[in-house]
Amino acid sequence: MKYARILLFLLLCTALAIALPQSSNAQFGKLKDKAKKAVEKKISGEEVKKEEAQDTTAGADEDGSREESKTPPPAGEQFQLFTKFDYVPGQTVLFYDDLSGEELGEFPSRWSLDGGVFEIAKVGQDNWIMASARGGISPKINVNQLPEKFTVEFEFLNRTAVYGGAYNLQIGLMRADGYAAAHLELFTNTSALFFMADENGNESRISDKKLPESFKEGIHTIRVMVTKSSVKCYVDNERVANAPRTAGFTPVSFLIKFHADDGDLEKEKLFIRNFRFAEGGKTMREQLDESGKIVTHGIYFDVNSDQIKGESYKTLADIGSMLTDDAALKLAIEGHTDSDGSDASNLELSQRRAESVKKYLVDTYKVDASRLDPKGMGETKPIDANTTPEGKANNRRVELVKI
């Protein structure tokens, strides 16, 4: 009898594992499930163990309000993890929400609810959007249709290492009819599933990639890059999907959705923050030929540091290849910040970061150092208003100016 119960349990687990990932487009469309009950318990005083402190801000900005992160691994070790990482963020930020100024316990003001229970909560010193019942939320993006080329990224705090329930986190690229043109689903710490729909709304599972063991707990970055011909998805340094666009790929908005038993969500909760949506644009070479400079948001640094992060690999590889192919090309490397923090600290940090970019290009691509001139510009040359999160995100950048 004992063995019969064990066998029955195993069969039920297997059935669940097979059934849950097979999400239909109708299920991902407009949510029908309502939250069983509102969860009003706040966790603003609760300290949550994090992985290493992270700063995924491109360019050279720091407001001085956060402590410097732990000493990162050597640059070579960092970049080795990203050798197959080809993500490059869009050039113009259309929506960015760092949740600053939000009130704890309230629904995030720049988002729309599509079922569930969501609120602003503190984890350590930082604001996050917390899900405590299954449902979905969408950023309020004022566009009729998403651009032909764009990128989206956000951070996900996974706290599910201590319980054995099934859950998934999804990001959908939604059509005007409320169904997903494509969506990425992260399933119970094990798999990254990617689905696309054709022009008739028929959905197919394109890929099913096993997630690394390290995904079980901590902060992770989820990214999507849409080009003229493809849709690519990334989890941390792993590319988990690469599919050609279909005739039915006509997204107009985003939906981030949480599936789990409400009891499991109440116990563990799930969190997201730093949602960034940017329009893609011209290649580096096209920018340089037309305007004499390249504007990039794809060079990332650790907090209060000039240490370049591994996510910068593809952007720096493109710059290095361009310099290698054109031996006569000389560039000024300009670091730019937003207006947060003091003028002096912004200027000093942006100079150090520009010098780090030069050193990496010289060391990695053997570029003659005399061809590169690092300049810290601080907040002196904004390209957007410093009064909105999107404007500040656009101002945090590195520019490569032809000399």
Image: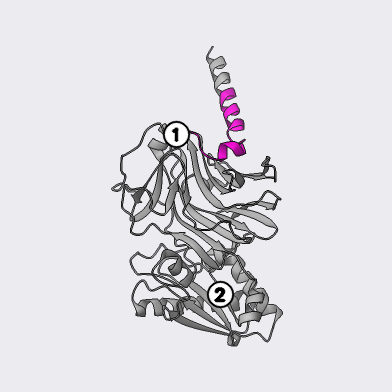
N-terminal-most mark, 1 or 2: 1
How are the residues colored? one colour
Residue drawn at point x = 59 percent, y = 54 percent: 234
In the image shown, does 86 or 49 lie closer to the viewer?
86
Judged from the image, the secondary structure of the residue bearing numbered disc 2 is: strand
Magenta stretch, residue numbers:
10-33
Q: Position of residue 89 (x, y in %)?
A: 56, 64
- Residue 131 in view in this figure: yes
Q: Is residue 219 visible?
A: no
Q: Is residue 264 magenta?
A: no
Quadrant of image for the C terminus: bottom right
- Residue 224 in the figure: left or right of residue 256: right
Q: Residue at x 43, y 56 (%)?
A: 52
Tell me, yes or no, whether the highlighted magenta stretch contains residue 24: yes
Q: Which residue is mark 2?
A: 295
Q: How far apart in space, not on screen, are marks 1 and 2 (Cα)? A: 44 Å
The residue lying at 66 percent from left, 42 percent from top is: 201
Q: Quadrant of the N terminus?
A: top right
Secondary structure found at label 1: loop
Q: Amino acid at mark 1?
A: Lys
Circle 1 sits on which residue? 34
Picture disc at residue 99: none
Residue 255 position within the rendered picture, expressed as x and y whole percent measured from the top left: 52, 47
Answer whether labels 1 and 2 touch (C-beta < 8 Å): no
Farthest-out residue, top:
1
Q: Position of residue 171 (x, y in %)?
A: 54, 47
What type is the residue that disc 2 sits on? Val
Where is residue 352? Give x, y as percent: 45, 78
User: What residue do we see at 47% from left, 65% from top?
Assistant: 57
372, 73: nearer the viewer = 372
